[in-house]
Amino acid sequence: MNPPRHAHISVEVRYTHETPNGAYRIYVDDTLLTERTWNLGPEYAINENISVIIPLGRHKFRLIPVNCSPSNFTLHNFHLGGSLLHTVCRSLEFDFAVDASLPAVV
């Protein structure tokens, strides 16, 4: 049996609307990892740094906008365990794989 892995996820969240009144939630699979209210202008970005214990296999990353349009958010520089997987994310939802290269949780 393969032990779960310790994964560090890093992603840059940008809000493109001029009026800072949005919020978002970040999920991996069906687990809510963070929720933020955006009170900054579009010239700012938030670097989310999230550590998770996660089993090997395919998983889904999702940013869900709250009280605003999905087109108000963009994702950039998605890293998993220090490896850059996406420079500019084409969607607010995408799959990623956790493999044995990440440290095992013992």
Image (cartoon, rainbow, N blue to C red):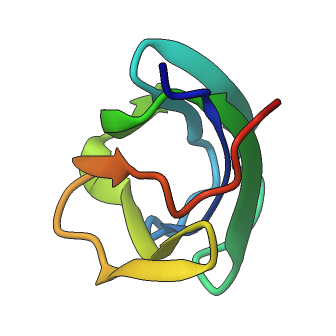
Most distant residue in the left direction: 90
Q: Which of 42 and 81 is in front in this view?
A: 81
Residue 76 seen in this snapshot: yes
Residue at the top extreme of this rendering: 30
Q: Residue at x 41, y 52 (%)?
A: 99
Where is residue 13? Give x, y as percent.
56, 65
Q: Look at 51% across and 80% down and name the residue there.
A: 83
Give coordinates of residue 76: x percent, y percent. Answer: 44, 77
Residue 59 in which image quadrant: top left
Task: Give coordinates of residue 70: x percent, y percent.
Answer: 29, 44
Q: In which quarter of the image is residue 58?
A: top left
The reply, left or right, for residue 3 in relation to residue 61 is right
Whether residue 102 sits left or right of residue 44 in the image: it is left
Residue 99 falls left or right of residue 11? left
Residue 74 in the image: above or below residue 92: below
Residue 30 relative to residue 12: left or right: left
Query: Could you tell me residue 16's position as x and y percent?
Result: 44, 70
Residue found farthest to the right = 106
Where, quadrant-wise, is the C terminus in this rendering?
top right
The reply to whether residue 68 is in sight is no
Residue at x 64% of width, y 86% of height? 43
8 and 3: which is toward the camera? 3
Q: Is residue 38 above or below residue 66?
A: below
Q: Say above or below: 35 vs 43.
A: above
The vertical placement of 96 against 68, above or below, is below
How many numbered marks have been drawn onto this rendered protein structure?
0
